[in-house]
Image: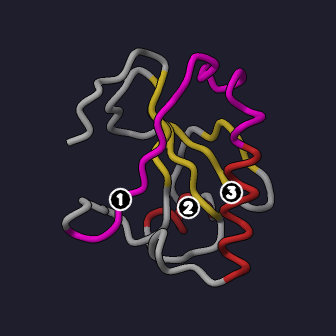
Amino acid sequence: MCVFCKIIASEIPSERLYEDDDMIIIKDINPQAKIHLLMIPKEHFPDITAMNDKQAATLARMLKTLGGLTDKLGLENGFRLVSNKGDDGCQSVPHLHIHILGGEKLSENMA
């Protein structure tokens, strides 16, 4: 079982800011911005390219839900979404997760 599956199952503690049937949103333990959250689907699938139609629909619901949470999460002035994939993309956990970065003016440098 991967680390995110263990977090979802409450086997590893996390600071959950939001949870529903599809996902959790937690604080990243190694923040790269003033606000650095992880949006993680409860169903395990390895990355953003490895989705079936049902999982793609879940991701769409997750993104729509995020749109309604921006004020609650302190992201009303904007945010950046990042999904790493594979070794070259520095994906550290093989379970889809989307980094949500914000709370300050972010660098225009994406590298």
The residue located at (49%, 52%) in the rendering is 98
Residue 47 lies left or right of residue 44; in this view the side is left
Label 2 Cα neighbours within 10 Å, binned few <14 / some 14-19 / many ≥20 = few
Image mark for residue 9: none
- Give SS at disc 3: strand
Residue at mark 2 to residue at mark 1: CA–CA distance: 24 Å
Give the residue number, with chain letter if any, for mark 3: 23
- Taking the spot 64% from the left edge, 26% from the top edge, the residue there is 73
Total of numbered circles in the picture?
3
Which image quarter: residue 105? top left
In the displayed orientation, state which residue is furthest to the front: 108
The magenta segment:
66-87
- Which element type, helix, strand or loop, lies under badge 2? loop
Q: CA distance from mark 1 to mark 3?
A: 18 Å
Q: Amino acid at mark 3?
A: Met
Task: Say which quarter of the image contains residue 87.
Answer: bottom left
Nearer the observer, disc 2 or disc 1? 1
8 falls in the magenta region = no
- Which mark is in front, 1 or 3? 1
Label at residue 84 = 1
Decide which of tag 2 and tag 1 comes sooner along the chain: 2
Position of residue 14 measured from the top left corner of the image (x, y, whole percent): 54, 44
Tell me if residue 39 comes above or below residue 69 in the rendering. below
For mark 2, what is the residue?
A: 11
Disc 1 marks which amino acid? Asn
What residue is rendered at 43% in x and 15% in y? 104
The spot of residue 22 in percent (x, y) is 74, 61
Residue neighbourhood size for the residue with mark 1, other residues' Cα within 10 Å, grouped as few (<14), some (14–19), many (≥20): some
Q: Residues within 10 Å of mark 3 (few under 14, many from 20)?
A: many
Label 1 residue SS: loop
Quarter holding the C terminus is top left
Q: Residue at the location (57% across, 75% down)?
A: 44
